[in-house]
Image: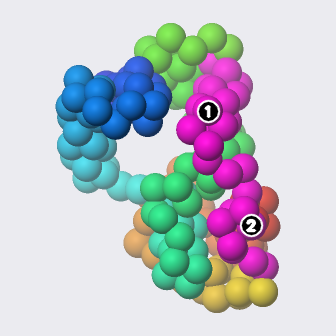
């Protein structure tokens, strides 16, 4: 579907656009990927955005970077419900190893783009953990997560990401 094709475009063209901002072909494909992603949002979001929204509100971090930092922990958390589907995603994207290969790809991709591994590298601290959890639990994105989000598992996710 559209979300998969958007992911493929990001996989293929974001490294080029990142390396050379004047690469108009890569940037055009990224613009298409962004539009596809925006359309895919209509199916709902999940824990990545539920975490990122209060982090951005409290610590003023860049939303896309915050999403990328949170993604590995959320993939691991959601694995029991998404691994089978992501075996197919990995195959479509040409990533070996199914869901585990996809998880490794995400971390390697983030590393290649200079994305921090932890939110603490972006100035996020645990002293606002209660506020982060309070913001996340009321975020509408919670409803789209494949595993029900609670204050306890959100707290664990924040700690894993920070």
In the figure, 138 relative to 162: above or below? below
Q: Is residue 88 among what the camera can see? A: no
Helix, strand or loop under label 2:
helix
In the figure, 125 relative to 108: above or below? below
Write down the quadrant of residue 108 in the picture. top right
In the figure, 88 relative to 31: above or below? above
The percent position of residue 83, horizontal first and vertical second, equals 62, 31
Residue where numbered disc 2 is placed: 120
Q: Nearer the viewer, residue 88 or 123?
A: 123
Real-space CA distance between mark 2 and mark 1, rounded to the nearest whole angstrom:
19 Å
User: Which image quarter holds the N terminus?
Assistant: top left
Looking at the image, is mark 2 or mark 1 earlier in the sequence? Answer: 1
- Left or right side of 126 for 38: left
Q: Residues within 10 Å of mark 1 (few under 14, many from 20)?
A: few
Q: Is residue 49 among what the camera can see? A: yes
The percent position of residue 7, horizontal first and vertical second, equals 39, 30
Residue at image x 49%, y 81%? 57
User: Which image quarter holds the C terminus?
Assistant: bottom right
Number of numbered labels in the structure image: 2
Residue at image x 36%, y 55%? 44
Residue where numbered disc 1 is placed: 112
Q: Is residue 105 magenta?
A: yes
Dominant secondary-structure state across the stretch colored magenta: helix
Write down the quadrant of residue 12 in the picture. top left
Q: Is residue 65 magenta?
A: no
Helix, strand or loop under label 1:
helix
The percent position of residue 6, horizontal first and vertical second, equals 32, 31
Q: Nearer the viewer, residue 86 or 105?
A: 105
The percent position of residue 105, horizontal first and vertical second, equals 63, 26
Magenta span? 98-126
Residue at image x 30%, y 51%? 41
């Amino acid at each position: 579907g559209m979300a998969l094709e958007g992911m493929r475009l990001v996989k293929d063209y974001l490294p080029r656009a990142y390396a050379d901002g004047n690469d108009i072909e890569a940037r055009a494909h990224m613009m298409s990927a962004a539009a596809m992603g925006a359309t895919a949002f209509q199916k709902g979001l999940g824990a990545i955005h539920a975490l990122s929204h209060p982090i951005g509100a409290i610590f003023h971090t860049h939303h896309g970077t915050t999403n990328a930092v949170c993604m590995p922990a959320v993939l691991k958390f959601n694995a029991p419900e998404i691994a089978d589907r992501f075996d197919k995603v990995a195959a479509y994207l040409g990533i070996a190893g199914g869901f585990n290969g996809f998880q490794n790809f995400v971390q390697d991709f983030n590393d290649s783009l200079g994305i921090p591994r932890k939110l603490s590298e972006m100035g996020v601290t645990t002293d606002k953990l209660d506020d982060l959890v309070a913001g996340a639990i009321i975020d509408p994105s919670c409803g789209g997560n494949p595993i029900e989000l609670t204050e306890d598992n959100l707290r664990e996710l924040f700690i894993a990401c920070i």
